[in-house]
Structure formats: structure tokens, C-alpha cells
Image (spheres, helix red, strand yellow):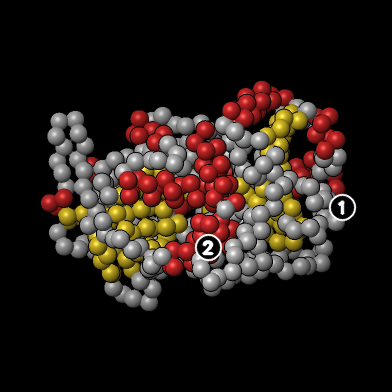
């Protein structure tokens, strides 16, 4: 929700052992204490004046193209997302992470403030999320809201009459019920949050290296043969980093490796170079390209406009207070676009999204397109939920990826969870053990209805 370097299949062995050569995109952050984090640099939709160019054109002109930037984060999931945070999920773990993250962001200066620097303002807009349900989905939404309330979420169920009274600009066709978040929901500036994490880490002595991870090295003596029903295991001794403008690999010794490579986390762990028994189970995380479109409509919804998720899956929110909006929609599985680049399909808006928007908000029939961009979801094809925790066979490898569009809002909670596992060997703040690898091994997906 990343021009960075592309992962490569290339790689060379170092010392005695095996080298796993990852494919995907990402960067390595070499952190104090001997841990290495391969973090995400693939993206998921979003934008903002700091991260994208936007050209206004006459109504007859084609869609304006976004101007590229030279930033290493210009295509990051974080800065390309729409910056939303919500409590309205159907899986308890996702609700817990959202509530944790909301508290973290509310007190962000206590957590990420740096002495002698300006206070952090993430420009939170507490306008809530509004989910619309058709008759065939009404009972499911009502049950989900009951679960959310049991978990402490402040959410209202609105009948069509109540919905029309609160948001008179909505056309009520095929809407049976709606859920509206009353607290800790809305959107914020992802770029500010990203920079706040980076500045805080630097102030605590973290050293970041901007380079490609091209291989894992496990030494032969660290590969433990299976004993009885136990699995063969190993430890990663070195990670091969390819630095920019260099023909050489830099072997980085590490005690802990955290794979947070986002959309390319799965490709990084593909079997290239690892002994076969250590490469299983495969990680079903892949890049999925998503488009975000921007438009202007002076007669559109006003300041109280929430982030609305339509019965069709189309969504939109305000972008400021001058009649500008952002929105998009995930395509059907059989129409997934090629993730090989971040080109935008403008016809997808004209033919698939705009008609749905105009049907739900009649004022949008006269909207004027302003711009568009694309980014990546780190999509977990198994069950569309994040995968957290230790690898079952690589003892010092931890994963935090696969959040399928929810990575930004769950980042504070996921980061805390992995830190507790690394430092204390167990979860303390939130029990997220069900999000671990076991469900992949046992083929037991976790169901989440609220994937936008």
C-alpha cells in the first residue's frame, strides 16, 4: 500500500554452506545488535504531494502521468498507499493489531519523538470507514460488527434510513445495512510515519544499508539432521548484500534475519540455493498491482465524507477539503494486471470504477480525473492475512509480510510482535501465534472478510 533495485537470481557461495538466492525487490537494513532486516520496498497504493507528481489538464486531455522521483522509497508500499487505518475487520488478530496501532499513533511522539526535533504530526483525519452491504451480505456484516464490539471497537450499524439521514449524498440502491467506524478510523500521511520510524531508529544507533539481498548462506555444520519426526533445521550465517554501484557482494554476518520484503518476501525465500528440505513450505506471498485514481468533483461529498467501501468493492475518500478524492478497486482474480511494472490502466477507471462511483454518489457523474498511480500489495494468496513469526526450518529467520493491503496500518503492531519474539522468545503485547507459519504447513487458512 515502492525505482528500487530489482532482486536477482544471481548469487555466489560464501564459506562452506548453501546460498539461497532470492528473487524480488527489497533492501537490507543492518541494525545494531547483529540483526539484519530485509525490508519491503515493493508498494501498495497511495500518493500525496510529497511522493508523486500530478498535472492538471483540460477536461479533454488524457490522464496526467505521475512524475518519477529519485527517492529510494518512491515505489514503497508505504508511500503509495492511501494511508487508511480501521478497526473494522472480521479476524480478531487484525482487530487487535489495528487497536494497538491506533494507540501507538495517538501517542506517536512518546514512541517516535526525537529530542530537539519538531513534534511529529501524521495529519490524521478521523473520518471513519463506511462499509455498505447488499441484502445477501447483511447478516454477515451484522455478525462481524457484533464481534468487533466484543473486541472493544466503536462501530455503528446503520439502516438505510439512518444512512441516508447521515450521508444524504449516497444513493441507497441495493444497500441493506452499513457499518460506520466511530473511533480510531480514518487516514493519515504515510510518508510522515515512515520518516518518523527512520529518524527514531537512527537516533538509537541503527545503521541502514541500501542494497539488494541476493543470497542467504547456511554453514554445513549448522544444518541439523532430523531426529525422528523432527524437521531438519539450519541457521543463516551470512546474507549476501549487493551494494549500489558495486560489482561485489558484501557478506554480512548476522544473528537474526527478519524478512520484511513485502511483495517480494515469497520470492526471496524461493528454493534457489537452499537445500530442498529447508525451502519448504513455500511462502505464498506475491506482488499484486493496484491502481489509485484521483479526481475532482466540486459538488461531491463534503468534510464529513468517510472512506466509503461500496457493495461492489470500489472505494473512495476525501483528499483534502477542496473537492478532491482518491479511490480504486481490486480487480477480479481472473483480471489481475501484470505486476512487472507500475504502469496504470486508465481504462479500468473509465470502464469499471467510475460507473460504480457515479451510481453510488450521483454527483460523481460529472467528476474530472486528475491523476493516477500504481503500487503493490504484498498479497498472501493463501488467506490474505499477514504471516508473522519464525520460519519452521531456518531457526534465526523471522517473517513479517503478506498483509495484503493492511501492512501500513498494522506496522506498529507487527513490528512490536516480531521484536518481542526476537528479544524475549514469545509474544507479550498481543498473541499473534495464529498468524504464524503453522497454518501454511497444515493448510488451515484464517478467514478475513474485510480485504479491500
Residue 128: % across, % down: 69, 44
Graded by Cα atoms within 10 Å as few (under 14), some (14 to 19) or many (20 or more), the crowding at tag 2 reads some
Whether residue 249 is situated above or below residue 235 in the rendered picture: below
Q: Is residue 132 above or below residue 73?
A: above
Is 133 in front, or is 109? 109
Rendered location of residue 354, percent (x, y): 75, 48
Q: Is residue 82 left or right of residue 252?
A: right
Residue at (84% x, 29% y) in the render:
161
Q: Is residue 32 left or right of residue 297?
A: left
Return the disc, 1 or 2, that comes first in the chain's sequence.
2
Q: Which residue is mark 2?
A: 113
Give the spatial CA distance, label 1 vs label 2: 40 Å
For label 1, the SS is: loop
- In the picture, which quadrant includes the C terminus? top right
131 on left or right of 171: left
> What x and y, as percent, mark residue 127?
72, 47
Q: Position of residue 203 (x, y in %)?
A: 44, 68
| Nearer to us in this view, 110 or 176 | 110
Q: Nearer the viewer, residue 382 or 451?
A: 451
Locate residue 239: give its quadrant: bottom left
Residue drawn 82% across and 48% down?
A: 301
Query: Residue 299's mark?
Result: 1
Mark 1 or 2: in front is 2
| Above or below, comparing residue 358 to residue 264 in the picture | above
Q: Report how many numbered discs are placed on residues in the image.
A: 2
At 21% from the left and 62% from the top, the residue drawn is: 13
Amino acid at each position: 500500500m515502492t525505482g528500487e533495485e530489482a532482486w536477482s537470481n544471481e548469487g555466489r557461495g560464501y564459506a562452506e554452506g548453501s546460498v539461497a538466492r532470492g528473487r524480488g525487490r527489497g533492501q537490507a537494513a543492518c541494525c545494531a545488535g547483529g540483526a539484519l532486516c530485509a525490508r519491503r520496498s515493493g508498494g501498495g497504493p497511495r500518493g500525496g504531494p510529497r511522493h508523486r507528481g500530478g498535472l492538471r489538464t483540460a477536461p479533454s486531455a488524457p490522464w496526467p502521468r505521475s512524475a518519477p522521483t529519485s527517492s529510494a522509497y518512491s515505489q514503497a508500499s508505504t508511500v503509495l498507499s492511501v494511508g487508511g487505518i480501521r478497526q473494522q475487520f472480521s479476524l480478531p488478530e487484525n482487530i487487535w493489531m489495528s487497536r494497538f496501532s491506533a494507540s501507538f499513533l495517538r501517542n506517536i511522539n512518546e514512541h517516535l519523538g526525537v529530542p530537539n526535533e519538531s513534534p511529529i504530526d501524521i495529519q490524521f483525519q478521523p473520518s471513519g470507514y463506511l462499509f455498505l452491504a447488499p441484502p445477501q451480505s447483511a447478516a454477515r456484516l451484522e455478525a462481524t460488527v457484533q464481534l468487533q464490539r466484543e473486541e472493544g471497537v466503536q462501530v455503528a450499524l446503520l439502516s438505510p434510513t439512518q444512512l441516508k439521514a447521515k450521508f444524504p449524498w449516497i444513493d441507497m440502491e441495493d444497500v441493506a445495512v452499513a457499518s460506520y467506524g466511530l473511533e480510531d478510523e480514518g487516514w493519515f500521511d504515510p510518508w510522515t510515519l515512515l520518516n518518523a520510524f527512520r529518524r527514531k531508529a537512527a537516533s538509537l544507533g541503527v545503521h541502514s544499508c541500501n542494497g539488494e539481498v541476493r543470497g542467504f548462506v547456511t554453514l554445513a555444520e549448522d544444518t541439523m539432521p532430523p531426529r525422528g519426526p523432527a524437521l531438519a533445521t539450519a541457521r543463516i550465517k551470512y546474507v549476501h548484500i549487493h551494494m549500489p554501484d558495486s560489482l561485489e557482494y558484501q557478506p554480512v554476518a548476522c544473528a537474526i534475519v527478519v524478512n520484511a520484503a513485502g511483495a517480494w518476501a515469497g520470492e526471496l525465500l524461493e528454493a534457489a540455493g537452499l537445500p530442498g528440505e529447508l525451502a519448504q513450505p513455500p511462502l505464498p506471498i506475491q506482488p499484486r498491482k493496484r491502481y489509485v485514481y484521483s479526481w475532482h468533483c466540486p459538488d461531491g461529498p463534503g468534510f464529513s465524507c468517510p472512506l466509503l467501501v461500496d457493495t461492489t468493492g470500489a472505494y473512495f475518500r476525501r483528499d483534502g477539503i477542496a473537492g478532491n478524492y482518491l479511490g480504486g478497486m481490486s480487480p477480479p482474480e481472473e483480471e489481475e494486471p501484470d505486476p512487472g511494472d507500475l504502469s496504470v490502466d486508465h481504462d479500468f477507471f473509465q470502464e469499471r470504477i467510475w460507473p460504480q462511483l457515479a451510481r453510488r454518489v450521483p454527483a460523481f457523474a460529472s467528476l474530472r480525473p486528475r491523476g493516477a498511480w500504481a503500487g503493490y500489495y504484498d498479497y498472501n494468496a493463501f488467506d490474505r492475512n499477514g504471516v508473522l513469526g519464525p520460519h519452521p526450518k531456518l531457526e534465526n529467520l523471522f517473517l513479517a509480510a503478506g498483509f495484503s493491503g493492511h501492512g501500513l496500518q498494522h506496522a506498529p503492531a507487527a513490528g512490536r510482535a516480531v521484536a518481542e519474539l526476537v528479544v524475549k522468545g514469545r509474544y507479550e503485547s498481543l498473541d499473534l501465534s495464529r498468524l504464524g507459519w503453522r497454518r501454511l504447513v497444515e493448510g488451515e487458512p484464517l478467514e478475513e472478510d474485510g480485504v479491500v
